[in-house]
Amino acid sequence: AAENLAVASRILADQGVVDAFGHVSLRSPDNPKHFFMPRSIAPALTTPADILEFDENSNALDAQGRAVFLERFIHGEIYRRRPDVMAVVHSHSPAVIPFGVVKTPMGAMFHNAAFLAKGAPVFDIAEKFGATNMLVANQAIGAALAERLGDKSVALMRGHGVAVVGPSLELAVFRAVYTEVDARLQTQATALGGPIQFLTPEEGEKADKVNEQIVSRAWDLWKRRVAK
């Protein structure tokens, strides 16, 4: 688990989804209430030795004095609400940011982003918490984000970033990568004048099942790219 999670962190950096900031987590296979995520470190630098275990309240079990991510509550509260989710990615995915601050919703541009056909709700922290530093810094904000995510795969975070979930670590990474790609493509299509013919929810559901079957092809390629 630690090795795969470290690899996932480095893949997300290599694919331009995260930079110095952002994080990925994995639900514990042994205790579903717990999860693993790195200590507070730039994703590209993550090694298996940096992986920590957190309890259901997002407290590190044995941090050994190491700093933990302030926004670990994104992960803990999504796991609490969504038993189907096995991995969570939080990033400040650059092409996605604009869709969190405008009225134009993100849609599924192509089959690799089929999961977006179900929608990508926008979480506005100000609705419940007023003026903040925009960070998901406690359980209450994490719970509100998880509630806004609902049964979707992606929640945009106004003025901040995005949370992406999946039934496996590989699929969560795949979805995070293709959410960024999809945002770039939608921006390009909008510049061409539209209107855009997105994948329908039915098309998205069918295509997403195929993606689940072939995700290992992308994972194996991306893993090789970041291998030491």
Image (tube, helix red, strand yellow):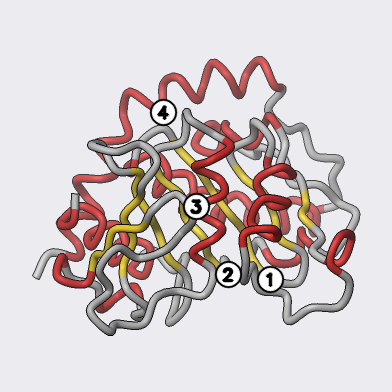
Query: Which of marks 1 and 2 precedes in the sequence?
Result: 2
Q: Which residue is tagged 3?
A: 76
Give the residue displayed 72% in from the left and 22% down from the top: 200
Instruction: Judge from the rendering whether residue 119 lies leftward or rightward of residue 223; answer left or right.
Output: right
Helix, strand or loop status at disc 3: helix
Say the numbered circle drawn on residue 92.
2
Compared to 209, does 61 lie above or below? below
Q: Which residue is tagged 4?
A: 211
Compared to 181, does 92 lie above or below? below
Q: Quadrant of the C terminus?
A: bottom left
Say the numbered circle drawn on residue 160.
1
Compared to 159, does 201 lie above or below? above
Circles 2 and 1 in contact, beta carbons < 8 Å? yes
Callout 4 amino acid = Asn
The quadrant holding residue 117 is top right
Q: Residues within 10 Å of mark 2 (few under 14, many from 20)?
A: many
Callout 2 amino acid = His
Residue at mark 2 to residue at mark 3: CA–CA distance: 19 Å
Q: Position of residue 97 (x, y in %)?
A: 69, 66
Query: Which of marks 4 and 2 precedes in the sequence?
Result: 2
Give the residue displayed 73% in from the left and 33% down from the top: 198
Nearest the eye: 36 or 156: 36
Q: Position of residue 179 (x, y in %)?
A: 56, 50
Residue at mark 2 to residue at mark 1: CA–CA distance: 6 Å
Judged by depth in the image, the label closer to the viewer, 1 or 4, is 1
Helix, strand or loop status at disc 2: loop
